[in-house]
Image (cartoon, coloured by chain):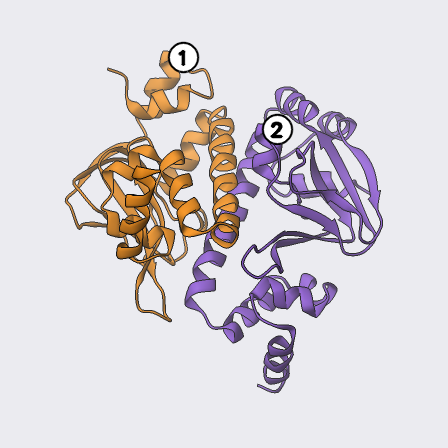
Chain colours: A orange, B purple
């Protein structure tokens, strides 16, 4: 079976087997138990991380409410990295924590730069997935202000069906900026509509 | 004098004069008057846009308040494009409007793809500027929830000193999610502190 990272890259660019082996050689496997932190606010993000299996939440604490705010979830075939902290090697402003046992592929900052030097066509892959994520993040900012909670939930389960079934409801409520009770009311209505 | 787009690219990758000429050949100049729209909500974003001079605001209407919400400003040497609409050639979910006379360099979708095919090293440039913008957007989402208005204003003028002097105060207030009156109080305190 092919490495899932290579499969993911191969959706956007064509790699020969030599390039595949070279890319694989830069990455190491890492397992997190449920509750383990991949990154803590204030630490420098040393690795870029590709999720093979499991689930993580990226979050920070809202200083006004004292509550966790979810920035994003990451499940298999997603990336989870504080991009600014990784790219500039400066302290992170958020936390990434496993919400179930999670397997990752990791690459350290220097290896990431070296991999791009040795396989420059990867620049295209990262450019495209960054465009995708940036587009969805801008959309989320706007929808948070423009749509009501019911519509946001409907969009969430349409856009992220796997996350919707995998992640606990109270975390999805946090992501949507509503209480767990309110989400449960929306879900009942959603099922019957 | 060098084309400002070529200067901007040359901060991240090395171009020879042949590549510079080739890249320039894909772009056309466009002037917007104050108030002209570059893009309207619902239209497909046909061009990627690099700002030579002037200033624009990217905004949408908050359905709860009926007010404009500023997604970002763009001044010289910035990009202003609905990345998702441009990349997928689907309708945009926001508006981009000139807030003063503005000169742009534009490239159409097909030309953008062709330019990347002919000058693949540009992938690296776009990957890096996307990382930069994504990092600052995640930071802004978190700071909006974590910092008070006074701290957000202090960060804004530190991070974007040129925009802070160029853009009208009521638009900066909108970007910071506060009223113009509240911003004016913060500014008085900021100057005397």
Instruction: From the top left corner, tell me how far across and down residue A42 is, in percent.
Output: 33, 61
| Chain of the residue under label 1 | A
Give the quadrant of the N terminus of chain B. Answer: top right
Q: Residue furthest bottom?
A: B192
Q: Which residue is mark 2?
A: B89
Judge left or right: residue B153 versus residue A52: right
10 Å neighbourhood of mark 1: few (<14), some, or many (≥20)?
A: few
The answer to which image quadrant residue B126 occupies is top right
As helix, strand or loop, the secondary structure at mark 2 comes to loop
Q: Residue furthest top?
A: A16
As helix, strand or loop, the secondary structure at mark 1 comes to loop
Give the quadrant of the C terminus of chain B. Answer: bottom right
Q: Residue at x 52, y 72 (%)?
A: B149
- Tell if the residue under mark 2 belongs to the same chain as the one under mark 1: no
Instruction: From the top left corner, tell me how far across and down residue B94 is, in percent.
Output: 62, 45
Instruction: From the top left corner, tell me how far across and down residue B152 is, in percent.
Output: 52, 69
The answer to which image quadrant residue A108 occupies is top left
The answer to which image quadrant residue B16 occupies is top right
Q: Residue at x 54, y 58 (%)?
A: B64
Q: Which residue is mark 1?
A: A16
Q: Are marks 2 and 1 in contact (CB under 8 Å)?
A: no
Measured along the vertical axis of the image, is residue A12 above or below residue A66?
A: above
């Amino acid at each position: 079976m092919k490495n899932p990272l290579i499969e993911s890259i191969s959706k956007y660019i064509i790699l020969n087997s030599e390039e595949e082996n070279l890319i694989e050689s830069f990455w190491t496997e890492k397992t997190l138990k449920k509750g383990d932190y991949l990154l803590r606010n204030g630490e420098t993000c040393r690795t870029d991380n590709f999720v093979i299996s499991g689930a993580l939440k990226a979050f920070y604490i809202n200083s006004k409410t004292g509550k966790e705010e979810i920035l994003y979830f990451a499940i298999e075939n997603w990336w989870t990295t504080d991009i600014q902290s990784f790219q500039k090697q400066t302290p992170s402003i958020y936390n990434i924590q496993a919400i179930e046992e999670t397997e990752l592929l990791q690459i350290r900052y220097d290896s990431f730069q070296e991999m791009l030097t040795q396989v420059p066509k990867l620049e295209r892959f990262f450019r495209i997935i960054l465009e995708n994520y940036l587009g969805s993040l801008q959309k989320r900012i706007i929808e948070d202000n423009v749509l009501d909670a019911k519509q946001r939930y409907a969009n969430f389960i349409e856009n992220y069906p796997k996350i919707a079934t995998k992640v606990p409801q109270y975390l999805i409520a946090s992501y949507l900026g509503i209480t767990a009770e309110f989400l449960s009311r929306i879900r009942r209505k959603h099922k019957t509509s």
